[in-house]
Amino acid sequence: MTAVGSPADSACRKNVQRTGILRQAWINRSDYLYVLPSIGVMLVVIAYPIYYTIELSFFNTPPSLQLRDKIFVGLDNYGLILQSNVFWRVTLNTIIWTVASTFFAFFLGLGAALALHREFFGRGVLRAILIIPWVISAVAASYIWKWIYHSDFGVIGAVLVGLGLADRPPNFIDNVNTVLPSLIVVNVWREFPFAMIMLMAGLQTVPDQLLRAATVDGAGPWQRFWHVTFPHLKGVSTVTILLLAVANFNSFIIPWIMTGGGPSNASHIWITHIYELAFGRQRWGVASAYSVLLFLIVMTFGYFYVRALSGSERKARG
Amino acid sequence: MTCIALGRAIGRGVSAAAITASLISAPAFGAPVDLNKWSPEYVRSIAGTEEFDTAADCGKVTPLDYKGRLTFWYQGVFEGDPDLLRQYYKDFFEAFRKTYPNIELEEQALTYNDLLDKFRTALLGNAGPMVVRLQILGGVEFASKGYLQELKPEDVGYSTDDFWPGAMKSDIWEGKTYGIPTNNETMAFIWNADVFKRAGLDPEKAPATWDDVVKYSKQIHDKLGIAGYGLVARKNAGNTPYRFMPQLWGYGGGVFDEATESPTYKQVELNSPASKQALQASYDMYVRDKSVPVSALTNQQADNQPLFLAGQLGMMISHPSDYNVMLDLQKKATGGDQAKAQTVIDNMRYGLIPTGPDGRRAVVFGGSNIHILKPEYVDGGKVDEAAAKALICFWASPEWSLKMAYAGSNPGNLNGFKTKWMKERLDNIKFLDVTTSMLPYGVPFPALPETPEIMNIVIPDMLQNALTGAMTVDEAAEDAAKKVEEIMGGGKL
């Protein structure tokens, strides 16, 4: 066996890179045999649905016809989507939802991670409490928040009216202007513990001696954070942001349960709109075209995610 | 492409209309059943006049010792239903298993709002149940797609004349019958007499017209600071069309011409002046007067019930079952809330749904139908037809179609009105005669495959667009009419 990292290993790798992909596969055929069952399963549960969704995106599926009687329309569904006013409304909602949820969940998580990184009495209990939003069911959380926000007898409204701070309960989710921010608050509340956990793990990698050395050199808390802690969190932050962004882009439960995308499409994001088109209106073709576009966008996120991970690994190997 | 689809849609619409026209006769949609005679007095006169033996009747369709297996999905009870109904559902399945001990029944209850989505998805994977009980607006969609087997009352030992013609219409596609009505209903208007009195209104008189509803709602809100009318405008919720369509028809509007004696479903009427007037009335209550629950856009009827019981809502369109729901909720209340709820129950009044400006009164002719699927769309690829017919005969029997509709609806099988349980029901369920009096005003939803999308998506969208200010009333009505035209044209968004 050749030692990894030795000159002989390097030469071998260069040699392999020069050969074609098929030749590499042939050389490593026994390895592929081991992973063949997994590849088979992935082809059935991932590749086929992707293929079928792409195929379906070229068909019209009116409610009076079975799916097998679908009508070929070429790229019409894509054209319809781009010409639709709802598409642009939903896209803007999706961008606001994804960017705002990711931004606030990350920075709230970062703040919580920094606060909990220091030793203090009750830290374990507080950490457990802060994780609660992340571990409870999103469905249950959505119903609870719907009740909290309720425009007629919600908890917030009752408190505000009871304290004399408002004449009538504020309208959170029955108003086109406030519904999306209200849902983002719920989403951030549910997601920030995930960012907190990831970043707390990242904080463990910051060497104490560096922080102490910075203190000796006269660095203040902000300078220590900015010049020592933050650079060490760069890798984990990138991964956390990408994971949050992908999760938010595909987030379904909170908007669907709390508002169903309403009122007047003001809280529809891509994923809820796709669901409504497919299952509520049976526009399987248009919904598939939407899904293909969504897939391309998520794959772009995925590309950067893999790059970020590879970068972290390379850095770790030195 | 659109032309072909449009042609097909029009063709189907015309054939549906022809069938409809053939089934309809003046004054409502009534041959051979004359709905005009279905007054509270008539219902009382026939109640308890006949005995029926369900096991013996169904034994003639499927022998009682028949051995088989059946999968069944149905629109079951939900949070807004009374406990009494839950018990009857439990009793039904116990009685069926006792009568047919060798039929292995796998039943699954789904709520009104989930059933269509789940059923459609299952059918795409050929994983449907053998028998399904769907809301009245669902049957034609699945019949038109070829998922359902032909099924008429005669196949399970009954006569087509035993069922409401309007209900049978919802089972017919291109001249063939694909299901049997299990229950049918018309709702009524409910109000809190105490709230009316405190607001300076006549406590014993329902608003006569929809314009009065707008006025009363404002008066209640202005004087008492509570919501006047229980508006519902949630999307993807059956409650919304059931509450808005009577208003739309009352003003003389409609999606098509479904409220006329012989509908053709050819012309979209959502943007007619009368339809806009109906939408304007909702706008006036929600936006101008702020006299209805703010949460109307995200809530459904089940959310209005506690508001009503708490004395925070003056009036709403309602099932007769709401009286029992209020009793159930009152039992669950504690302390001072219980007394408060009792006051509301004592002050509950039922009346006819208000009319439009020209005296037109209308209500949705609702209910459910039961269907058998074709084997190729069923999980396992087989349908046990004998077992399926046994269950359908049982549910559609005079006894069980009455019991399963005991608190909230009416039996699909008209012979149910003649049973002793109907007599008992008339004594136990308050205000039942009022909802029965609404039957002659019942308007069935358009018998078209596109109806679920129109009723569950387009109508609520129109309301939400107008009520949120996203569009003016005119724009919202025009937008909805355009969407219906596109849907009938075969697709688009």
Image: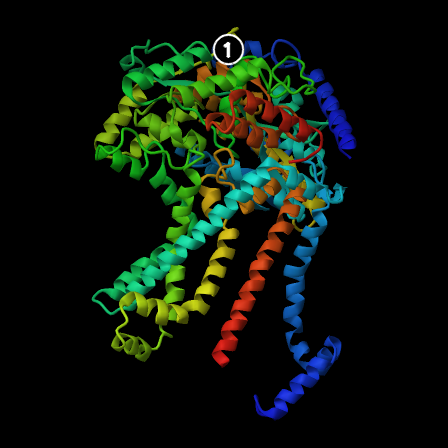
- Of all residues, the one furthest to the top in this rendering is B358
Location of the C terminus of chain B by quadrant is: top right
- Quarter of the picture containing the N terminus of chain B is top right
> Residue placed at 63% from the left, 44% from the top?
A287
In this view, A279 is above or below B258: below
- Residue at left offset 62%, top offset 24%: B481
Task: In this rendered view, identify the residue nearer to me: B222 or A204.
Answer: A204
* Mark count: 1
Query: In this rendering, would B470 be left or right of B272?
Result: left
Between residue A32 and residue B315, name the one nearer to us.
A32
Q: Taking the image as drawn, is residue B423 in sight? A: no
Q: Position of residue B141 (x, y in %)?
A: 66, 33
Residue at 47 percent across and 24 percent down: it is B421
Label 1: element kind? loop
Location of residue A98 in the rendering, given as x and y in whole percent from the top left corner? 48, 50
Amino acid type, callout 1: Gly
Q: How is the image coloured?
A: rainbow
Q: Is residue B162 left or right of residue B305?
A: right
Residue B172 position, x and y percent, is 69, 26
Q: A56 or A210, which is in the foreground? A: A210
Q: Give the class, few, some or many, for how many residues have Cα within 10 Å of label 1's Cα (few <14, many ≥20).
A: many
- Asked whether the viewer can see residue A254, the reply is yes
Lateral position of residue B42 relative to residue A140, left or right: right
Pointer 1 residue: B356
Residue A60 in the image: state x and y as whole percent. 72, 40
Quarter of the view holding residue A152: top left
- Rendered image quadrant of residue A193: bottom left
Which residue occupies the foreground of this view, B279 or B95?
A: B279
Dot 1: chain letter: B
